[in-house]
Image: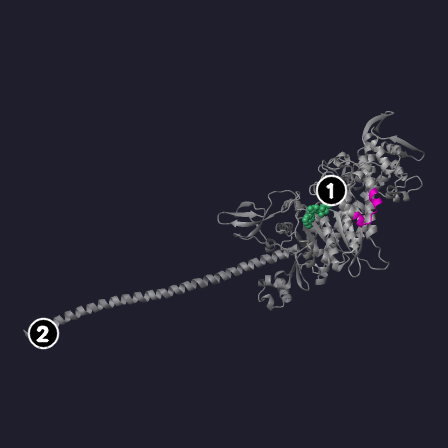
Amino acid sequence: MALQILRTGDWVWLPSKAGGEYAVDIGAKVKFTDSGQIQVVDDDGQEHWLDKKVALKAMHISSVEGMEDMIELGELHEKGILRNLFTRYLENNIYTYTGSILVAINPYQVLDIYNMQQIQQYKDKKIGDLPPHIFAIADNAYYSMQRYGHDHGESGAGKTESTKLVLQFLAAVSGQHSWIEQQILEANPILEAFGNAKTIRNDNSSRFGKYIDIHFTPSGVIEGARIEQYLLEKSRIVNQAHNERNYHIFYCMLKGLTQDQMNQLHLKDATGYYYLTQGGEITCEGRDDRAEFSVIRAAMKVLMFTDDEVWDILRILAALLHLGNVKYSSTEVSNIESAEIQDKTEIQLVAKILGVDANKLYQGLTSKTIQTREESVTASLSQEASLDVRDAFVKGIYGRMFIWLVDKINAAVYKPSNPGQKVRSIGVLDIFGFELFDNNSFEQLCINFANENLQQFFVHHIFKLEQAEYDSEGIQWEHIKFVDNQEILDLIAIKKLNIVALVDEEAKFPKGSDATLLQKLHQHHSKNRNYLMPKSSRAAQFGISHFAGNVFYNVKGFLEKNRDTFSIDLMELIRNCKFPFLLNLFKEEFKLSGKNTLKRNATLGSQFKKSLESLMATLNACQPFFVRCIKPNEFKKPQIFDRELCTRQLRYSGMMETIRIRKAGYPIRHKFKDFVDRYRLLADGIGPAHTVDCKQASQKICGIVLKGTDYQLGKSKVFLKDAQDVYLEHQREITISKKIVIIQKMVKGWHQRRKFLLMKKNVVIIQAVWKGYAQRKRYLAIKRGYMRLQALFQSRVLTQRFVGYS
Ligand SMILES: Nc1ncnc2c1ncn2[C@@H]1O[C@H](COP(=O)(O)OP(=O)(O)OP(=O)(O)O)[C@@H](O)[C@H]1O
């Protein structure tokens, strides 16, 4: 964009003063230009005085007005996108398209845009017919089926809410109000109770990923669904950060059970449990745990949970809470640091509730059997190690129960189709976004690995869309290059000795340790440009240069987390328990294991990798639609737009990828008519667009102005590179300036001539009057002279005559 002379009312881009990684230019309006300085007011309402000589970039008209689809922005860059989202957000337009992506900004207020009337309005409409909306995406998916939506974003951005809205829309438009629809909708309260928790960033944060596949009959009626879950955050069950809570279900249960049930399970108020109070919060503002418990119970009924099953779940939850209250003390046995539990009340309770032997439970929680080839040795554990064993036990049970719950829900809602029958389905993926914390561990590696996969899928998809546009326009695109993140995926999980494989290998090795793992990682990958060595050689870290930024992972606990198992002694305890429900949770493991020895199960890393592969295969067979959820502020408040927070999310979202891919090809496209209207003045003899053949005219303009450069003409559009667009705009401005000079010249000439002619006319009048006046004056003088002469003459004549007579 060429620099302009600024006038009051113009819009410009003001370079950010904040500095830093996420600082982006802000929009501003020129207020005064009268003095040597100009005053501008930026989008945040801040006034700035600037020297008139400061070169400010003028804002494109599309950025001033805002666009529903940001791909149409004249300036497709970060600041343009950010401003567009900002101005729309202030008007409560929380949805905006960027090509095929729907950007949704969490409004943090209830907007009246999801009612039945809106559903009806969006039903059967094309995208773009109505303002951007999550219902437009859901409708599009419904009418073209075999598509899926993908909610993506960071915690609290609104992924889960978006997922629920899509489900709500689909249930409404398939229009049957059937039992199965209700069952699918009721799966949510259960999953949320066991898999959501209050975090600092979100009062109802999903701590697991999910993919819901909804199946339809050929006539479009919902006939079933299948839910897949990914990577529940298990550490939360035993540990909560400040101001956070454990999973909702614990608090709901303690509020909602009858006194009699509480007595049977020996339960008390939530304040009495270590596992529920570490965050210092047992209530969550705006949530009624007692009422929620009724909702959960009702949902369980709808999903065919028997009363016995519900009771068994409660038993397990109670046992876990009691386990958390087991108090260890440190002691020494044969000069070895050991742990003992003095008050055995909790042990007795847990043993009773879980139907296990109390002594064996005690043993299992304080000692460990190590099996060597020849014999098995029991060693006592230190207090710290005992706590780890207990917590691993609790996490193991809860994690398996969560999987059981999802299986149970699927048993109710999943109706396998007849072989050979094509399944029509819409899948909705609600999955964790890219994570970068102060301390990143194995979970973050898995999550970021998932995001790398999704990013690649996204990039390929966008690229495919671009190719489709080029193909339909008959444009040559072979030479367009783009780089995806394959190298990073290779490093994490594909190439030989990749990170996941090394973590697995070390986890399976009985003497494996986090330290040797780190050594091996450094040894094999230090030369890989996507592998980052820690800044300090003593740090137990390694880094990965992810598509969204560099992340350093702390290897401490990697192996334990990857093994995802607990001690053989406690596993044996469960194998011998008299609680069928608990036994059933572990049936897969026991099925795999031999008579008495436990066969090693797949590690968490390899399980996750496998489920991710299957997810990617499913996604690749679908026509995707992306919903990018953005969190506007950390305060969970409406109408606050934190520019840096949003910029960071935009960068991580892959949305910039759309722009990057566009830029790799021909980012600027003009319809022939628009092109002619805008640039016809660059070539002589081209009339207005409606009077000429626009394709030919476009060709002529390009031939003259862009001769020898890389542009292409498609079937309906001109395809240009950025530089050509800048050049065309520049030429247009120069030509306009020249024409303006000509017009100015003509106008000035005409004006001066008119002035001259008028003056001339007036001068003639003045001259005529003056001349008349002068002549008249002269005439009168002459006349008077002659009169005097006459008189004189006559007097002479008369005198002579008188003298002659006399
Ligand atoms: N469209 C919306 N309208 C009104 N409020 C919303 C909307 N979307 C999200 N919210 C609010 O934001 C909160 C957080 O949203 P949500 O739980 O969907 O985030 P999330 O991205 O799934 O986060 P997490 O990854 O932590 O699960 C919701 O509890 C709700 O209060």
Disc 1 is placed on an element classified as helix
**Corner quadrant of residue 349:** top right
Q: Is 197 drawn above or below residue 337 in the view shown?
A: below
User: Marks 1 and 2: which is nearer the front?
Assistant: 1
Q: Counting residues from the N terminus, which is met first, the one under dot 1 or under dot 2?
A: 1
- Specify whether 7 is left or right of 130: left
Tally the numbered discs.
2
Task: Measuring from the top left, give residue 305's x and y in whole percent.
Answer: 82, 47
Of residues 605 and 186, which is closer to you in this image?
Answer: 186
Using the image, tell me which numbered label, if any, was put on residue 801: 2
Using the image, tell me which numbered label, if any, was put on residue 289: 1
Task: Measuring from the top left, give residue 170's x and y in whole percent.
Answer: 74, 56
Crowding at label 2, few (<14), some or many (≥20) Cα neighbours within 10 Å? few
Amino acid type, mark 2: Arg
Of residues 257 and 271, which is closer to you in this image?
Answer: 257
The response on whether ligand 1 sits within 8 Å of label 1 is: no
Considering the whole magenta stretch, tell me its main secondary structure.
helix
Residue furthest toward the left? 806
- Image quarter of the N terminus: bottom right
One can see residue 282 in this view = yes
- Specify whether 126 is left or right of 611: left
Disc 2 is placed on an element classified as helix
Q: Is residue 303 magenta?
A: yes
Task: Measuring from the top left, give residue 455's x and y in whole percent.
Answer: 74, 50
Residue furthest toward the bottom? 805
Residue extent of the magenta highlight: 299-311
Q: Is residue 463 magenta?
A: no
Crowding at label 1, few (<14), some or many (≥20) Cα neighbours within 10 Å? many
Q: Name the residue: 25% across, 66% down.
A: 777
Task: Measuring from the top left, give residue 144's x and y in whole percent.
Answer: 75, 60
Q: CA distance from mark 1 to mark 2?
A: 150 Å
